[in-house]
Every structure is written in C-alpha cells, then in structure tokens.
Image (tube, grey):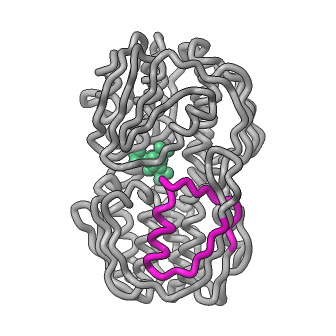
Amino acid sequence: MEAKKLQPISSSLHGTISVPGDKSISHRAVMFGSIAGGVTTVENFLPGEDCLSTIACFRKLGVTIRQDGTRVTVNGAGLEGLQEPDGILDVGNSGTTIRLMMGILAGRPFHSVLIGDHSIGKRPMTRVTNPLKSMGASISGRKGAEFTPLSITGGNLEGIEYKLPVASAQVKSAILLAGIQAKGDTTVVEPEKTRDHTERMIRMFGGEVRTDGNAITVHGGQTLTGTHVNVPGDISSAAFFLAAGAIVRDSRIELKNVGLNPTRTGIIDVLCEMGADLSIKEYEESSSEPAGDMVIQTSDLKGTIIEGELIPRLIDEIPIIALLATQAEGKTIIKDAAELKVKETNRIDTVVNELAKLGARIEATEDGMVIHGKTSLHGGTVSSHGDHRIGMMLAVASLITSDTTHLENSEAVAVSYPSFFDHLNSLK
Ligand SMILES: O=C(O)C1=C[C@@H](OP(=O)(O)O)[C@@H](O)[C@H](O)C1
Ligand SMILES: C=C(OP(=O)(O)O)C(=O)O
C-alpha cells in the first residue's frame, strides 16, 4: 500500500469524539460470554481487527456469536460446551487473544493449534505456557513453546500459587482463566498492579475472585452466567487525542465516555504532571467499569520521569507519551519499561527511530528512553512497522511537523481503532 500523505495542520483542533470501545474489555466480553452459560449481550464492542480475531477463534470453538458493528450477542457454550476446533485458531496480530485463549484452552480436554501473524510469531509465550504446563496442560511450540505455532491439549488442571516474573495482565488473566477450571485454589501474585478487567469480569459473570494486595485468588470449578456488558471507550485510544489537544496550538477537544479504570489511568497522571490543561467528569458509577468525559486544551508542557508502578498503568500509551515529551520543556525519562520490547514491535526502537526521523531528540535506553524537549519537528517518511500504536502516534506527530509526512503501513491502525483517521479529520 502507498504511504499515507499527512499534511501539518494550519489551524487548531476542535470538536468532540466518542472513542471506540475498550479493546481489553471487548476481548474479555466475548471470551467470558463464550465460556458462560446463557446469552451475553455486548454494547459498544470494538470492531477492531484484534477483537474480530477473538470472535473468529471462539466461533471455531463452536460458539454462536452474532456481531453487528458495535453490538455483539454471544450464545454462551459454557466451558463444557466448547468443542475441539477442526481448523487452526488464528489470532492475527493480537497478543491478548492468544494469551487469554491459552488459559481457557488449558482446561479443555481437546487439542488446538494457535497461530498468528509475523509479529505474534516473535512475541514471548513461555510466560504463559510455563505456568499453564505446571498446572497440568500439555503444550508444545517452537523453541520450547516460546513461539507460535503453539499446540495445546488441556484438562485435569491443578491450582497453583504463581508469582508473576513480569507485570502482565495477559499472563495473570490466562492463569486465572485456567484457575477457574482447576482443582482447588489458584493464586497469582503480581510484582505491580496491572489492569484488572478480568477480575471485574469474573464478578460480573457471577463468579468469585478474592484480592489481597497484589495477590489474586480464584477457586476452581466455577460456572459463569451470561450478562450484559456495556464497554466504555478505550482510554488507550483517547490518549492520541489527549496528546493532539495538548500539543496542537489553541485546541480544545472533548472526549466522551472514556474508561477510567484506575489500573489504566497512568496517562492522566502523566498529563497532569506535565502541566496539561485536562478536566475530567466521572459518571456516577453505574457499571463495573468506571467511565467519564474529558476536555483537553492546549497548554505549555514540562518534562517528567515515568517509572515503577506507573508503567503497567500506561504501558500502551508510551509511544504517544514520547511524542508529548518532544513538545515539553526539559528532559523526560521513561524507565522500567523493558516490556515495550515485546509488543507488536520493539516499541523502544520503533518509537526512537521513527521520531528521530522527524527531528526529535530522543535516545533509547535498556528499559525505556530519554527525550529532550522542546523540539520543532519536520516532515519525512516514517513507518508504523505494522504497529497500530506507532501508526497513530506518527499521525498525531504529523499535525505539528513543518512540512508533509508520509506514513507507511498506516492501515495498521485498524487493529485497535478502525475509525482513527476519520475521527482525526473531523477535528480539523
Ligand atoms: O490484558 C490486556 O488486555 C492487555 C495487557 C497488556 O499486555 P501485557 O499483559 O503483555 O502487559 C497490554 O499491553 C495489552 O495491550 C492489553
Ligand atoms: C500490546 C497491545 O496489544 P496485544 O498485546 O493484545 O497485541 C496493544 O494494543 O498495544
């Protein structure tokens, strides 16, 4: 595909956006709906490529799922009703799909094979396959089940107590999904708190989960019941417009119905720390996931340090935070973020290399990056490298470059935000 030609903005950004449904919650709504008994209805589902991969995989496991844009109806099969697929389960570009599905399949007494795209083929899987094997699942794959294709036969699991070596909601969720099918209790201990959508969803579907500090426990043999899930907007998608509003001069952008789960709001903390003009009105809590409206207006920004427990609360927002930092006075340091190396791309390298092509003063470190601001960016030819979040970050960058930017592989944005360019153009 030809590179997308992006012109710098001549004025300011104004308008209102309802960002699409949260990707993490949309995946889980389909998965929990599939393994629950009865019907689950999902409203404001994200029809992005990743979540469509989840639907396709569960259909192959024998679940009847109707999807009509943002409305999804799942006729739950119950855990016992899932069937051995007669073809390969293809997760596309989605790490969440493959890792959480492994947890579900670990408890099912049949054989499945999972593959994904080129990027998935490079992402580490022993972080999931090792604990699932120790619970009793039989799993093999390339390089000792580190890489796809993965093959799994599950059943007869024993509960475990497992200390996560990395702060990963996907690994935690996979173990909890296996745990609800195992004999006895399963406890996962996190080094730092990660997004808790799985825990909230177990409760929403009538299951039980106990949390004690960073330890999360489920008991085996649980049955779940279908429910209605109203998916809030994705704060990770909103982040691109929060950044655009903050750095494009004289702008004001309103964002409606954005998810405000505290395990996801690190971006808000960072924007406030950097001096952004951001106001938030949280809705009176009506569902299990908090949400609200936001208004961002342009302001002067200053550099900051991002590290420690903050990292899992904004892990997917680091590419756009790096762009914000190029427009902030002084130095921004991002550390403790080595996990970025194993996302859709090595996000330390892709962020640093692509932003440097536009004139940013940015250096990679072992576990993050250092950005020196404030820098005027120029145009150039850049690439998403097939990574949706890099593509959207570069599109936002192109608004403030001095001349034209050509963005290669711009179509990658459809993984999490198919209407991204329409929404961006509606603000100009
Ligand atoms: O559980 C989830 O829905 C996700 C967890 C995070 O990954 P890790 O668990 O690998 O940190 C995040 O980067 C990903 O976009 C979605
Ligand atoms: C890392 C991401 O997703 P996943 O791990 O599901 O591919 C992301 O959306 O930025």
**Is residue 411 visible from the viewing direction of this image?**
no
**Is residue 383 visible from the viewing direction of this image?**
yes
Q: Is residue 201 left or right of residue 302?
A: right
Quadrant location of the C terminus? bottom right
**Position in image of residue 226 (x %, y %):** 69, 27
Quadrant location of the N terminus? bottom right
* Residue 105 position (above or below residue 116): above
* Residue 19 position (above or below residue 88): below
**Position in image of residue 422 (x %, y %):** 70, 65
Q: Residue at x 71, y 30 (%)?
A: 40
**Position in image of residue 269 (x %, y %):** 47, 69
Q: Is residue 279 magenta?
A: yes
In the rendered image, which quarter is residue 178 located in?
A: top left
Q: Nearer the viewer, residue 26 or 151?
A: 26
Q: Residue at x 39, y 29 (%)?
A: 149
* Residue 38 position (above or below residue 46): above
In the rendered image, which quarter is residue 365 located in?
A: bottom left
Which region of the structure is painted magenta?
254-281
Q: Residue at x 40, y 72 (%)?
A: 322
Q: Residue at x 25, y 31 (%)?
A: 143
In the rendered image, which quarter is residue 361 located in?
A: bottom left
Q: Is residue 97 magenta?
A: no
Q: Is residue 345 left or right of residue 406?
A: left
* Residue 164 position (above or below residue 82): below
Q: Nearer the viewer, residue 402 or 123?
A: 123
**Position in image of residue 157 (x %, y %):** 38, 15
